[in-house]
Image (cartoon, rainbow, N blue to C red):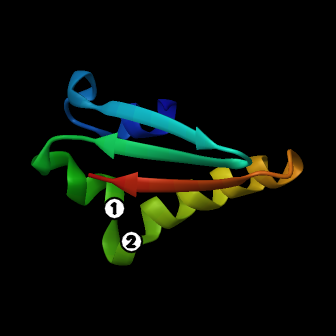
Amino acid sequence: MYLVGSLAEDPQSVKIGVSEDGNITRFKLALSSSDRGKIIGKEGRVIKAMRSILQAVAARQNRKVYLDID
């Protein structure tokens, strides 16, 4: 995911796992502990914005999408 890689200090450490089950897609982000704060953002604003973008794209395809941080 381009957004996560551009926000992280160490983009090579970012791993994105994808699992699909029917019309549900789940993205799992694995990143270094120093990058978690940047990805989550103040009061969770950055991660909420990313989730909104993913949900808007998924809604056009009649799918549900989830973005989790491990």
Q: How many marks?
A: 2
Label 1 SS: helix
Residue 8 on image: x %, y %: 28, 38
| Residue shown at the point (41%, 34%) measured from the top left | 17
Q: Which mark is residue 4?
A: none
Outermost residue on the top side: it is 12
- Name which quarter of the figure residue 31 lies in: top left
Q: Which mark is residue 44?
A: 2
Please give the residue where the numbered disc 1 appears in the rendered image.
Answer: 40
**Which amino acid, mark 1?**
Ile
Nearer to me, 20 or 67: 20
- Name which quarter of the figure residue 69 lies in: bottom left
| Residue shown at the point (76%, 47%) measured from the top left | 57
Q: Is residue 33 left or right of residue 19?
A: left
Residue 70 on image: x %, y %: 26, 52
Question: Tag 1: Cα neighbours inside 10 Å, few (<14), some, or many (≥20)?
Answer: some
Nearer to me, 57 or 28: 28
The image shows residue 17, relative to residue 29, as above or below, that is above
